[in-house]
Image (spheres, helix red, strand yellow):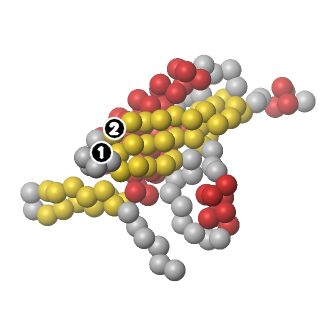
Amino acid sequence: MAEKNEYFTQKLENGTLQISEDVVASVAAAAVLEVEGVCGLSSNISTDIAEMLGMKTMARGIRLTPMKDGAVKIECDVVAKFGQSVFSLAKTVQDAVKSSVESVAGLTVAQVNVNICGIAMPKELKK
C-alpha cells in the first residue's frame, strides 16, 4: 500500500512551497527536546504498532492538525524530568514549539497543546 504524504502548501510569488507534515513534526519534536526539564517525547500504541509494521511515522509524540485557515494545531506528548513544575514546563514547551515552527516552516501555529504523559524518575528514587 502506498503512503500518502500530507503537505502544508504556501503560495509564493514564483510558484508554491510544499512542506511535509513529517518536516513540521520533526521541527516541533526538536524544539520540545531542547527544553530544559523535558526527558523525552511519549508515543502511543498506534505509533508503536505502525513502527513494528515498518510504516513511516511522524516524529514520535507529535500530532499535527491542519486548520482550514492554513494554520496548524500541534499536540505534544511529553515526558518530564522529576522535580519540574509541569505548568511552567508546559508553557516553555508551548513557546518553544510555536517559535520554532513559525520561524523554520513559516506556518502560523494556532495552538500548541502539551500533554504531560509521564515523569522520569531519577535512578536513586526507583530503588
Residue 126 x, y percent position in the rendering:
85, 30
Left-right relation of 9 to 12 = right
Q: Quick one: quadrant of the C terminus?
A: top right
Residue 99 visible to the viewer: yes
Please determine whether, in this image, residue 21 is positioned above or below residue 87: below
Q: Which residue is mark 2?
A: 110
Query: Which mark is on residue 71?
Result: 1
Residue 5 x, y percent position in the rendering:
40, 67
Q: Are marks 1 and 2 in contact (CB under 8 Å)?
A: yes
Going by the numbered disc 1, the residue's amino acid type is Ala
Left-right relation of 7 to 125 = left
What residue is rendered at 84% in x and 26% in y? 125
In depth, the one of 59 and 4 nearer the eye is 4
In depth, the one of 123 and 106 nearer the eye is 106
Q: Residues within 10 Å of mark 2 (few under 14, many from 20)?
A: some
Residue 45 x, y percent position in the rendering:
67, 55
Marks 1 and 2 sit apart, C-alpha to C-alpha, by 6 Å
Residue 93 x, y percent position in the rendering:
48, 31
Left-right relation of 110 to 58 = left
- The tally of labels here is 2
Which of pointers 1 and 2 lies earlier in the amino acid sequence? 1
Image quadrant assignment for residue 53:
bottom right
What residue is rendered at 66% in x and 63% in y? 49
Left-right relation of 64 to 115 = left
